[in-house]
């Protein structure tokens, strides 16, 4: 089994021509650098807070059973934890990274009442997002993205909300590369943390989601063709997953599927007709950036005022 999977991955890497991918290989907190997992060294003897992962290669299934921490959920042979005072920055470092299109997201998950995450599997936890950077400027077609900054700097920093209650948590940095049409590449890595401080806050259920489960393979931010005509006029991008939790539950999370900005009317591409569906002509309307057609889609097809149904790919027509 193992040999077959490896062979498949090698063949695929050749076919898609993306030999240089990446993974988090160290972490910095408070000016101190902690070794991360080293996927190309023997697991034996690795003494690290980083969760094991086997290669720099992407996860191509957006709902993969290993997409929580890029592994089966377990720690390495000598698990450590990084102590982080709530309110401090956590920086992940990559040895290599070569993709400039797609979002960066940072999640955390509580390990419950355990003193540390050493015996807590990363599968089956409830995750909350503390940081994200999607499309930073320009259009989906050729704008600048969070992962482009990682390509330039080989690092990314997120701040642990100061109000977060102390305890054992996992942190998870994910790079989502969108350079291949409708074939998103997920690169998640995790580390064990001990959060200290005097906070008492914890995200409400609106901000919590399982991974896999926080997004679906047909979400508009996941199954996307950044080279489509529609993408040339999209100036916002719906980052997958729940809204960012800033440390305050009283601020209701904005609906992540409806970005705040919209492209200027002059740049809206010509409307295309979605495949026939069973929805009645006077049914509910689809919000801007929602799905309005596509193969297998049976939901409403009428776009909210100010947007029109446009072909993103054969499986996904979107109100833009
Ligand atoms: C982005 O693409 C648009 C549409 O093709 C083009 O007009 C524009 O010059 C491009 N911008 C950059 C920075 O390449
Ligand atoms: Cu790659």
Image: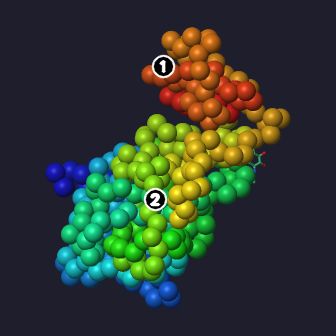
Closer to the camera, 42 or 9? 42
The answer to whether any part of residue 189 appears in the image is no
Colour scheme: rainbow
Q: Which mark is residue 298?
A: 1
Q: Which residue is mark 2?
A: 203
Closer to the camera, 265 or 241? 241
Report the number of numbered marks.
Answer: 2
Whole-percent x and y of residue 98?
Answer: 53, 63
Closer to the camera, 77 or 11? 77
Question: Mark 2 packing: few (<14 Cα in 10 Å), some, or many (20+)?
Answer: some
- Tell which circle, 2 or 1, labels the residue nearer the N-terminal end: 2
Whole-percent x and y of residue 150?
Answer: 56, 67
65 displayed left or right of 245: left
For label 2, the SS is: loop
Question: Mark 1 packing: few (<14 Cα in 10 Å), some, or many (20+)?
Answer: some
Whole-percent x and y of residue 218?
Answer: 46, 36
Residue at the image point whose x is 27% and y is 69% from the top: 113
Which mark is in front, 2 or 1? 2
Residue at the image point whose x is 61% and y is 66% from the top: 149
The answer to whether any part of residue 219 appears in the image is yes
């Amino acid at each position: 089994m193992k040999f077959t999977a490896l062979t498949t991955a090698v063949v695929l890497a050749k076919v898609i021509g993306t030999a240089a991918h990446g993974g988090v290989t160290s972490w910095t907190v408070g000016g101190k650098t902690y070794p991360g997992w080293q996927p190309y060294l023997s697991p034996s003897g690795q003494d690290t807070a980083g969760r094991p992962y086997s290669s720099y290669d992407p996860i191509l299934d957006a709902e993969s059973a290993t997409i929580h921490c890029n592994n089966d959920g377990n720690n390495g042979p000598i698990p450590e934890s990084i102590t982080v005072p709530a309110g401090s920055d956590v920086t992940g470092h990559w040895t290599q990274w070569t993709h400039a299109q797609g979002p960066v997201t940072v999640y955390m998950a509580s390990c419950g009442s355990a003193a540390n995450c050493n015996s807590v599997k990363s599968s089956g936890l409830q995750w909350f997002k503390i940081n994200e950077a999607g499309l930073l400027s320009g259009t989906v077609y050729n704008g600048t993205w969070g992962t482009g900054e990682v390509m330039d700097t080989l690092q990314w920093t997120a701040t642990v909300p100061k109000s977060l209650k102390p305890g054992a948590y996992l942190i998870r940095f994910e790079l989502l590369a969108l350079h291949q049409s409708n074939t998103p590449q997920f690169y998640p890595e995790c580390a064990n943390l001990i959060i200290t401080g005097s906070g008492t806050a914890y995200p409400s259920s609106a901000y919590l989601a399982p991974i896999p489960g926080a997004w679906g393979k047909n979400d508009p931010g996941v199954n996307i063709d950044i080279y489509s005509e529609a993408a040339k006029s999209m100036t916002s991008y719906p980052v997958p997953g729940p809204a960012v939790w800033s440390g305050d539950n009283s601020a209701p999370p904005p609906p992540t599927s409806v970005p705040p900005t919209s492209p200027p009317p002059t740049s809206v591409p010509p409307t295309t007709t979605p495949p026939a569906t069973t929805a009645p002509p006077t049914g509910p309307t689809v919000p801007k950036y929602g799905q309005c057609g596509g193969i297998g889609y049976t939901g409403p097809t009428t776009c909210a005022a100010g947007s029109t149904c446009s072909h993103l790919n054969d499986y996904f027509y979107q109100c833009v």
